[in-house]
Amino acid sequence: MRLTGLVFVLLAVMALSIVGIELADRAEASVEGGVRRYAFAVTNSDLDTALAEIAPDQRAVWMDWVRGQLGNVYEVRGIAVRSPSLLRRLFERVPGGPYEVTAVLDVNRDYPDEFYQPTTRVAVEEFQGRWYLAGPLLAPH
């Protein structure tokens, strides 16, 4: 009987862990989706959609720069979203959620004279429950 109770408790802990991890991953998945939507919008020369992935208070600042990037072909090769570790959140009382994203891109692959493979880092910020890039990919800092 004790063994059955222990098994039940362990299964419950495992189930709660899975649910917790899934809930924690939503913010990171949102940031990753934002990077992909931004890259797709730049490739398709869609200024409004590209700016929609940038934090509202930064859109006017970066509008001309993003406009200059429109039409470049951004192919996302990899994305890494950074969040504080569980230990850091517990001991340093750092808020959870992502704080930065790194994207590896191929830009203008079909145009040999213009092709390059940058890796770019951008801070992310939450505004009214949604995650945004703090600035455009590849922007000068």
Image: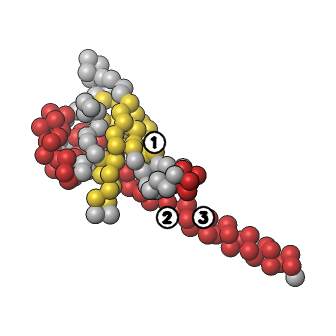
CA gap between label 2 and label 3 equals 9 Å
Give the residue type at disc 3: Ile
Q: Residues within 10 Å of mark 3 (few under 14, many from 20)?
A: few
Q: Is residue 12 above or below residue 84?
A: below
Q: Circle 3 is placed at which residue position? A: 18
Query: Among all residues in the image, which is located at the extreme front?
Result: 92
Q: Circle 2 is placed at which residue position? A: 23
Give the residue type at disc 2: Leu
Question: Where, by quadrant of the figure, is residue 129 drawn?
Answer: bottom left
Give the residue type at disc 1: Ala
Q: Mark 2 near mark 1, Cβ–Cβ under 8 Å?
A: no
Q: Which mark is residue 80?
A: 1
CA gap between label 2 and label 1 equals 18 Å
Q: Is residue 117 visible?
A: yes
Identify the image quadrant of the C terminus: top left
Q: Give SS at disc 2.
A: helix
Taking the spot 26% from the left edge, 42% from the top edge, the residue there is 135
Taking the spot 75% from the left edge, 76% from the top edge, the residue there is 8
**Who is closer to the viewer here, 100 or 19?**
100
Residue 118: horizontal and vertical position, in percent? Answer: 35, 27
Taking the spot 49% from the left edge, 49% from the top edge, the residue there is 84
Query: Among all residues in the image, which is located at the extreme top?
Result: 113
Q: Is residue 99 above or below residue 115?
A: below
Q: Give SS at disc 3.
A: helix
Q: Mark 3 near mark 1, Cβ–Cβ under 8 Å?
A: no
Q: Residues within 10 Å of mark 2 (few under 14, many from 20)?
A: few
Taking the spot 34% from the left edge, 43% from the top edge, the residue there is 123
Residue 80: horizontal and vertical position, in percent? Answer: 45, 42
Q: Is residue 37 visible?
A: no
N-term-proximal mark, 3 vs 1: 3
In the rendered view, does 44 fall on the left or right side of 76?
Answer: left
Q: Which mark is residue 4?
A: none
